[in-house]
Structure formats: C-alpha cells, structure tokens
Amino acid sequence: MTDGAIIEARELTKTFHVGDVDVHALRGVNLSVARGEFLSVVGPSGSGKSTLFHILGGLTPPTSGSVMIEGRDLIQMSDADRTSLRKKIVGFVFQKYNLLPTLTAEENIEIARDIAGSPARPAAFDSIVKLLGIEGRLHHKPRALSGGEQQRVAIARAIVNDPAILLADEPTGNLDTQNSQVVLDLLRRLNHEFGQTILMITHNPEAAAYSDRIVHMRDGRIEQL
C-alpha cells in the first residue's frame, strides 16, 4: 500500500450480467487516496464512478482487483467485517438524503451512533451540529426542513461516529445553487479544519473544484490522475 494512502484500489474491474450482455462498469481502475485528502471523481453518467463508490464503501464486491482501506484488504473481509467498516470507518452521503421521515433531525443523526454501538459524545455532537448550522433545527422532522438542511443533517449523520473516510455520491445533486455552495463549503471545512478524508463523486466540475484533487472517469477507466 502506498505510504500515507488510506484508500488504495488496484486493477479493479466490475462486470454486470444483463441478460445475455456483459456490461463492463470498471475496466482496471487504479486509485490511491491519501489520508486527509479531499478528492473528487468526475465523469458523465455511465462512466463507472458510482460503481467505484459502491465498491470502495464495501457496498458491492468487484469482479476482480483489490481494495485496501486503512491497510485492510476489503475483498478478503467477512460480511460482518464489511458491515463493521460501514458503521465505523466509512461515512456515506448520498444525493437522496435518506432521512427517516418519522424521526427528528437529532434522532436521524443519533440513530447512526446507536446502530454502530458508539458511545455518546455530547461535546462532539454539539460541535458537529454547530459547524453544520443545524443546531436550531434538531427537533424538526425532515418534511419541515429545506433540501439544504436535510443534506446537512445527512452529513452530520455520516460523521457522528468520526469515520476515517467520508464518501459522498453527488451530494449536491438535489440542491439549488445556493444550498449546493453551502454544502460544498461545509465539506471543505470538514476537510481543511478537521482533516476529514473525503472522496466525492460528481458530474459537476464546479462542485469538483472545491476539492484538492480531481480525477476523471470515462467508460470505466480513470483518464487522468
């Protein structure tokens, strides 16, 4: 594994079988992400970036290749170990906020801690919600929150367990320009002020510009490192 890398993918391939047709979503992807880096993976629909996201997060296995997360071989992990990784090591932010509609914002954040079995950290929780500007919205349910507020709650939920890695898949895809800028500013602050490693998938070059480094995908391959 490359010195200082927290994520390292080598020769990743992923083939989906659709009827009698093989769809090659990834074609030998190599990618290294340094600890504390904010990296964007940019590409059009069908480029393979979301498939890469799901493999790096342990959500789906590759057809071949290797993935090292914090020095551990993701492919060789048991299902239980991969589940533990998703609870404690990797936080996820998606385009769809995936908040539970019957829970308040605070409960949506805390449920991630409960599922992971992490101890309560009131000071850390307060710091997170203050940074994200949602301290006054904690007792509201998702239907009473704007899209930008819902995404900020989703980010809080993703980082409440202090994950080593934050994976964000089109985090501004459902937001207007103003709320997109707020969310991207917050991601950059998480990276610059707290050293959070962030890998963001996006089709938007303007969003990618908030990161430290950009790689481009097309037809299942990384075009530029």
Image (spheres, rainbow, N blue to C red):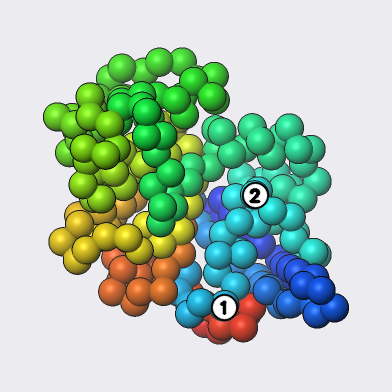
Residue 198 placement (x, y as % from top left): 43, 53
Residue 3 placement (x, y as % from top left): 59, 55
Above or below, comparing residue 72 to residue 40 in the picture: above
Dot placed on the residue nearer the N-terminal end, 2 or 1: 1
At x 80%, y 64%, the residue is: 63
For disc 2, the marked residue is 59
Residue 47, numbered label: 1
Q: Is residue 95 visible?
A: yes
Q: Is residue 132 visible?
A: no
Viewer-proximal residue among 121 and 115: 115
Q: Quadrant of the N terminus?
A: bottom right
Residue 89 in the figure: left or right of residue 151: right
Residue 192 placement (x, y as % from top left): 29, 51
At x 39%, y 47%, the residue is: 97
- Inspect the image, locate mark 1, and give the three-letter code of the amino acid beneath it: Ser
Looking at the rendered structure, the secondary structure element under dot 1 is loop
- Inspect the image, locate mark 2, and give the three-letter code of the amino acid beneath it: Leu
Looking at the rendered structure, the secondary structure element under dot 2 is loop
